[in-house]
Image (tube, grey):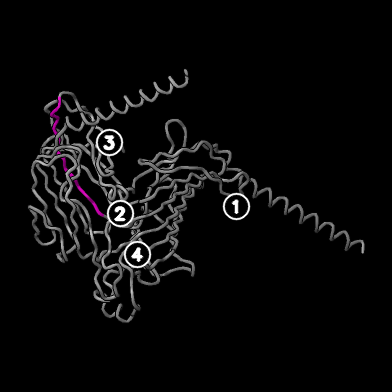
Amino acid sequence: MEALRSLGQLVLALSIFSHLSLLAYSSSTQDLQIISAERRIDLTSHIVKVFLTLKVENIGTSPVSEVLLAFPPTQFDHLASLKAAITVGKKKKKSYVPLEVNPTELPDAPNGAKSFSILLLNPLNTGETATLEVLYILTHSLEPFPAEISQSESQLVYYRDSAIILSPYYIKQQTTFIRTPSTRVESFTRVESTNRAASEIKYGPYKDRPRYSYSPIIVHFENNNPFAVVEELVREVEVSHWGNLQITEHYKLAHAGARHKGIFSRVEYQSRPHAGGVSSFKHLLARLPPRVHSVYYRDEIGNISSSHLRTDYLRSDLEIEPRYPLFGGWKATFVIGYGLPLEDFLFESPDGRRYLNFTFGCPLAETVVDKLTVKVVLPEGSKDPSAVVPFSVEQHLETKYSYLDVAGRTVVVLEKRNVVPEHNSRFQVYYTFNPIFMLAEPLMLVSTFFFVFMASVAYLHIDFSICKSS
């Protein structure tokens, strides 16, 4: 009987808690309103970039410390990056301060809408306003239509969105601009206040829209930019305290655009490069760090000589060309390797630990990586490794054995999916290392040569003794 009574009290407490949480979220969404919203959608690449400017006002009676963003489920599944900043100062003294963004849940969100919370620097008091700048990146959001094209056809794609910004707040005025790569737009949804000028489509301005308003639109346009997608990339960063940092990158590259149909004519491709394969690509640009050396580019067949390296004191650009041009649905695998001076990337922290400061992400420009694995191979004898990454990743440790290793080398493995160029930021791997371990391999080599030498002397002594006796 006591157990049933306790269970009933627990159910009642959970019910009250969920009801209070619902009231709290409902109150917070009613305390704010968006005075003006401007959204700019950049469709010039296969990576969709959305710039959102929000001016919010607290119309409630209590301070508000967060602003909520809502996304439809179709966009949430393709969301690769989300950043927010608040505007501080005016005109020439204007600056942008980054804000923390975390996923959250709204109990009253309709149709499975997903939400994020932007934490403000200071609570917004009653009657105060704040201007937020938001950037979010969508991948695999352009649908090729038709799904298959011949070598000479241009690539057309669909983009689906809403003319009205999905928001948990009342919006007094809003406008959406959509920019396409060219002026060739096959069709687009026309609703009230729709205008088009050259390669830009404007929806709005719209006034006094209630919470969670939605007006679906479709834009059908030409996009022949390279749909370069790395299905899997494994980057191995091997640290050697003898002064070198060796990078090895294994790529599985695919053209994610409209699939190629029919036969491929190399004669047409070379004689009419701007018409016979306009949606294909045969060049890729890898942006490498400065002072790079010992660069190689090869595949399963062997070394590929069609590459060009340009270096200066700021960066190194490696232009690579696969063995064949890539059309929709075609794939290629290859390896890029290079060395770097260790002094540019390995430092010592104030607490005595060493740390590697390197770049996360993919060196190839304008590519999406479906799965990225970064392996940092530390010198043998390294202890207590820890990684600091500015965004969420999966982490675990491995052990790798190389030449003359006894206990093996610790490998810090970082994994992330849906990686875009905005993820090319610095990360750190901290570890402790006793310099005495640097003598392990030289001593092992010296000992090996000593024993070989002594064995050879002993063998020659025995051999001479046998000859003399004979």
- 59 inside magenta stretch: yes
- Residue type at mark 2 is Thr
Q: Nearer the viewer, mark 3 or mark 4?
A: 3
Q: Earlier in the sequence, mark 3 or mark 4?
A: 3
Front residue of 334/263: it is: 263
Q: Residues within 10 Å of mark 2 (few under 14, many from 20)?
A: many
Q: Earlier in the sequence, mark 2 or mark 3?
A: 3
Task: List x then y, in percent, for residue 48.
Answer: 25, 54
Mark 1: secondary structure: loop
- Residue type at mark 3 is Leu
Q: CA distance from mark 1 to mark 3?
A: 55 Å
Q: CA distance from mark 1 to mark 4?
A: 38 Å
- The residue at the point 46 percent across, 38 percent down is 386
Q: Earlier in the sequence, mark 1 or mark 4?
A: 4
Q: Nearer the viewer, mark 1 or mark 3?
A: 3
Q: What label sits on residue 139 in the rendered view?
A: 2
Q: Earlier in the sequence, mark 4 or mark 2?
A: 2
